Amino acid sequence: MALERLISSTAGLATPALVVDAAAADRNIAAADVRLRPHFKAHKRPQLMRRQLAGGDCTGVTCATAWEAEVAARAGLHDDILVANEVADPGGLESLRRAAAHARITVAIDSPRHVALLRGIECAVLIEIDVGQQRCGRDPADEAAIVALAERVQATPGLTFRGLQGYEGHAVLLPERPSREEQVARAAAILNRLRTVLDCELVSGGGTGTYDLSTHLDEIQAGSYVLMDTAYGKLALPFVQALWVWSTVISVAPAYAVADCGLKSLGMDHGNPTVTGGSVWFCSDEHTTFGPEQPLAVGDRVRVAPAHIDPTIAYHERMYLVAGEDVLETWPVDLRGW
Amino acid sequence: MALERLISSTAGLATPALVVDAAAADRNIAAADVRLRPHFKAHKRPQLMRRQLAGGDCTGVTCATAWEAEVAARAGLHDDILVANEVADPGGLESLRRAAAHARITVAIDSPRHVALLRGIECAVLIEIDVGQQRCGRDPADEAAIVALAERVQATPGLTFRGLQGYEGHAVLLPERPSREEQVARAAAILNRLRTVLDCELVSGGGTGTYDLSTHLDEIQAGSYVLMDTAYGKLALPFVQALWVWSTVISVAPAYAVADCGLKSLGMDHGNPTVTGGSVWFCSDEHTTFGPEQPLAVGDRVRVAPAHIDPTIAYHERMYLVAGEDVLETWPVDLRGW
C-alpha cells in the first residue's frame, strides 16, 4: 500500500513509532569490546549494521535466515556472511544460491540431509552442535557421526567444511551471571573437545547475555546488544536501552491510562513491555493499559520499552533514528520475519 | 526490498507461509448468522473482507485504527466504516480526515478532549462506555458526563452523535459460556440503561466469543470468526480453524523436531502455537521445537495453528488462499500493525 504518512519531526510521528536513540546505540557499539559477528536478525537494517561493523572488531555478519543473507550480501554489508541456522525449504535454498553470488556464504547444518539439500550451492558449512539448547544441532556424544558429516561435506563439490557452531541459547538469558558461566563452561568443554578431532577454521556462537563469557568461541553472534530490551536489561550488562516504541495516550480514567501500542507493535513472548513513568496492566492488539505515576492527558506521548527486541522490530514498517527531538534518518523495515 | 520470491504451488511456498483454507473460511462466514460489522483489524485484507461482506448480514466495516479506515474507505469496502477506538495522534487524525472523503466515518471517543481533536473532521461519533474491560470508555456511572459529551458532539460543527460503543472484551475469551453470558448481561444492562437517556441510532460492540450472546447490540464487531485461532478454538463456537502457518522441518533429533517458524511469525501473547501431529516445547525467533507424534525428516512440511490470529497475521508479508494443494490467490499483507 503506497499511501505515505509524512513526518517532519518527532512531534509529528504517527504512533506507535519505533524509535532508535542514536547516541545510546553508539554507546552500545563501543561497549561491545569483543570479537563479534553481529547478528542481522535483531533489526535487519543495513544502515544500523554498517554502524556496528564500523564501530567494532567484527569478523562478518550473522543472519538467521537465508533471505536475510541474500539481502545482506546484495547490500555488500560484508564479504563473510553466516546463516546460523539450517535451511531446508526451497525458497531458502534459492536465497542461499543467490547470496553466494555476492559474498562468501557459510551455513549451519546438522545432518547428511542438509548436505544433500545444499548440493549445487557454493558455500562453507559449520556443523551445529547442540550444547544444551535443544534446538537444532548434533548431539555432541555422536562424535563419530560428526566427523563423518564433516567428511561428507568435504567430499561434496561446492561445499567446504569450515568448523562448528554451538549456540548457548539456553544460557544467554539466565538471570544470574554464575548460572550463565556454568552453562558456558559446559558448552566450552563440548566444543573444545570436538576441536581436537576436527580441523576447524571457525567455532562460532554466543549472544548478548554471554558476550564476555564465551571466550572459547572465535566470534560472538550477538545482536540485541546494540538496541537492547528489558529482558536483557535485567542482566547488568554494559548496554543501555536504545530502542523505544513511542506511543500516544488515547484515553485516561482515574486509575489508568491507555496508550495506542499493543500486541501488534510489541513482541510479547518475554511478557509485557515497560512504560516509562507507569506500570503496565495489560496489552490488547492496539492498546496498552497502564497505571501512570503522574496524571496524563489524551494526546500525551509515552515511551515504551519492549521486553523482546527482535519480534518487536519485525512488526514495524519503519524505524526512526533520533537525537533528542530530531529525526536523523527514517529506515524502512523491509524484511519482515524471515 | 523488491527481491521477489516466486511461487508456483503450495509445494514451492517459502516457509513460514501464512495460509488461509478457503473452504474453511467460507464455512465460517456462513456460520456467523447474526448482524455483523466485521472487524478489519484481524487480517486487513480487502479481498477477504469482501467475501465476509458478501456472505453475511453486514452493516458496515469495523476498523481498529484510522489508518485501517483510510485503506478500507479508499478500497470502497463499504460506505459505513467505524473506527472502534479513540484516535489522538496527528497521523491518525489525518487518516480520519482522508478516509472521510471516501465513506461515512464513525469514530469512538470517551472525553471532551477527543471532541476537540476531531474538530474540522466530518464524522459521526460513538461514545465508548467501559462495560468492564478497563480499556478506554467512560465510566457508565458518569451518566451526566456522558449526556454532556453527546451534547458537546452535537454542538460541534462536522460531528454527529450516532450512539454508543460498549465492547465486552473482558468476556469474549472466558472459557465457560455461562461466565460469558454473565458478563454480557452486565454490559447489556449498562447500555440498555444509557439508551433510555440518549437518542442512539447505533449501539455497537461484541466479538467472536460473544457473537450470539450480545443480543442487546445492533451489530457485532467480530473479526476472528472468519479465520479463527486456538484461543477461540477452545470455546466450542461453530467456527473452524482456517488460518495456518505452514512450516518446514529444519532439524530432527531423537526426541524432538524443529520447524522454521517462531516468534517472528506467530503472535505469542496467548501462548504457544499448536502443531498438527506434535506438541510444542518452545519457540525461538525463527524456530519452533516440538515433540512429533510420528518420526519426521528434514524438509517435511508441518501445519501450525497460531494461538492469536491478529498479531500473527501482522508479522507476515503475504498470505496464500489455498484449496488443498492449489494456491488460489496470493494477498500482500500491506498494513502492518496499525
Image (cartoon, coloured by chain):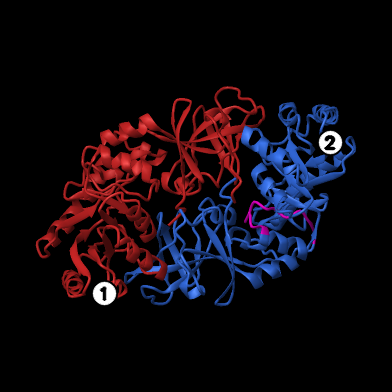
Chain colours: A blue, B red
Q: Is residue A193 visible?
A: yes
Q: Is residue A43 magenta?
A: yes
Instruction: Look at mark 2 in the image and give the residue it sits on.
Output: A160
Instruction: Look at mark 1 in the image and give the residue it sits on.
Output: B112
Quick one: B102 or A159, which is closer to the camera?
B102
Instruction: Please name the predominant secondary structure of the magenta segment in the image.
Output: loop
- Label 2: chain? A
| Residue furthest top in the image | B294
Give the quarter of the figure containing the C terminus of chain A.
top right
| Residue B49 sits above or below residue A150 on the image | below
- Label 1: chain? B
Q: Is residue B270 magenta?
A: no
| Residue A15 sits above or below residue B258 on the image | below
x 62%, y 56%: residue: A43
Q: Position of residue B261 (x, y in %)?
A: 57, 40
Q: Residues within 10 Å of mark 1 (few under 14, many from 20)?
A: some
Q: Position of residue A65 (x, y in %)?
A: 65, 43
Residue type at mark 1: give it: Pro
Distance of label 2 from label 1 (alpha carbons)? 68 Å
Q: Quadrant of residue B257?
A: top right
Residue type at mark 2: give it: Thr
Q: Is residue B222 left or right of residue B255?
A: left
Kindly report which numbered mark, 2 or 1, lies closer to the viewer in this rendering.
Answer: 2
x 20%, y 60%: residue: B164
Quick one: B206 or A180, which is closer to the camera?
B206
Marks 2 & 1, CB-CB < 8 Å contact = no
The range drawn in magenta is: A34-46
Q: Position of residue B15 (x, y in %)?
A: 57, 37
